[in-house]
Image (cartoon, helix red, strand yellow):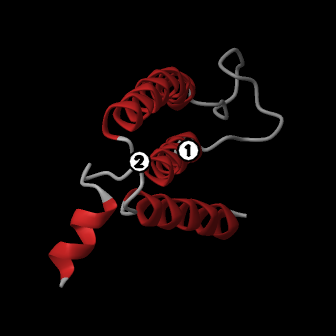
């Protein structure tokens, strides 16, 4: 099970980084969101959840660590606010510049600079 979760985190991280390196704003936002999900999953897995163990209350040694859960909950709220801000920023840049490229240069100028 650990191998499957590790592979899932690696794939989500790789896809997020790949999308963040794209030239348009929407794939960058999706990549940032995927990368955030991968980091949240990594932090959550580090808490070593145990099936059938009580959260904190109990007499035994096996309990679920609440710190990673609190960190992930906080990270979800922060990432939601960050995604909303970046999306509004991208829409504003699209309205001001007329395109959705990250560098803001028009398509014709970009093609001329490559030649």
Residue 43 at what x, y percent from top left? 49, 42
- Asked if residue 41 lies left or right of residue 19, the reply is right
Give me the residue at 31% from left, 39% from top. Answer: 97
Give me the residue at 51% from left, 31% from top. Answer: 68
Question: Residue 12 appears in which quarter of the rendering?
Answer: bottom right
Question: Residue 60 appears in which quarter of the rendering?
Answer: top right
- SS at mark 2 in the image: loop
Q: Is residue 45 above or below residue 1?
A: above
Q: Which corner quadrant holds the N terminus?
A: bottom right
Residue 41 at what x, y percent from top left? 57, 46
Mark 2 burial class by Cα count in 10 Å: few <14, some 14-19, many 20+ = many
Question: Residue 91 appears in which quarter of the rendering?
Answer: top left
Is 19 or 50 nearer to us in this picture? 19
Residue 111 at what x, y percent from top left? 27, 74
Q: Is residue 73 above or below residue 24?
A: above
Give me the residue at 48% from left, 67% from top. Answer: 14
Q: Which corner quadrant holds the C terminus?
A: bottom left
Which of pointers 2 and 1 indicates the residue nearer the eye?
2
Q: Which residue is mark 2?
A: 100
Residue found at the far right of this picture: 52
Q: Is residue 41 above or below residue 81?
A: below
- The answer to which of marks 2 and 1 sits earlier in the sequence is 1
- SS at mark 1 in the image: helix
Residue 18 at what x, y percent from top left? 44, 66
Disc 2 to disc 1, how far (Cα)?
24 Å
- Asked if residue 53 lies left or right of residue 105, the reply is right
- Asked if residue 75 lies left or right of residue 65, the reply is left
Mark 1 burial class by Cα count in 10 Å: few <14, some 14-19, many 20+ = many
Q: Which residue is mark 1?
A: 37
Is 46 or 73 nearer to us in this picture? 73
Residue found at the far top of this picture: 57
């Amino acid at each position: 099970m650990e191998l499957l979760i590790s592979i899932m985190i690696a794939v989500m991280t790789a896809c997020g980084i790949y999308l963040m390196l794209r030239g348009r704003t929407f794939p960058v936002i999706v990549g940032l969101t995927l990368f955030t999900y991968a980091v949240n999953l990594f932090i959550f897995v580090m808490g070593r959840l145990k099936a059938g163990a009580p959260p904190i209350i109990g007499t035994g040694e096996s309990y679920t660590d609440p710190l990673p859960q609190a960190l992930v909950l906080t990270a979800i709220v922060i990432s939601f606010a960050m995604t909303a801000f970046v999306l509004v920023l991208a829409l504003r840049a699209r309205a001001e510049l007329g395109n959705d490229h990250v560098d803001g240069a028009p398509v014709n100028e970009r093609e001329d600079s490559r030649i």
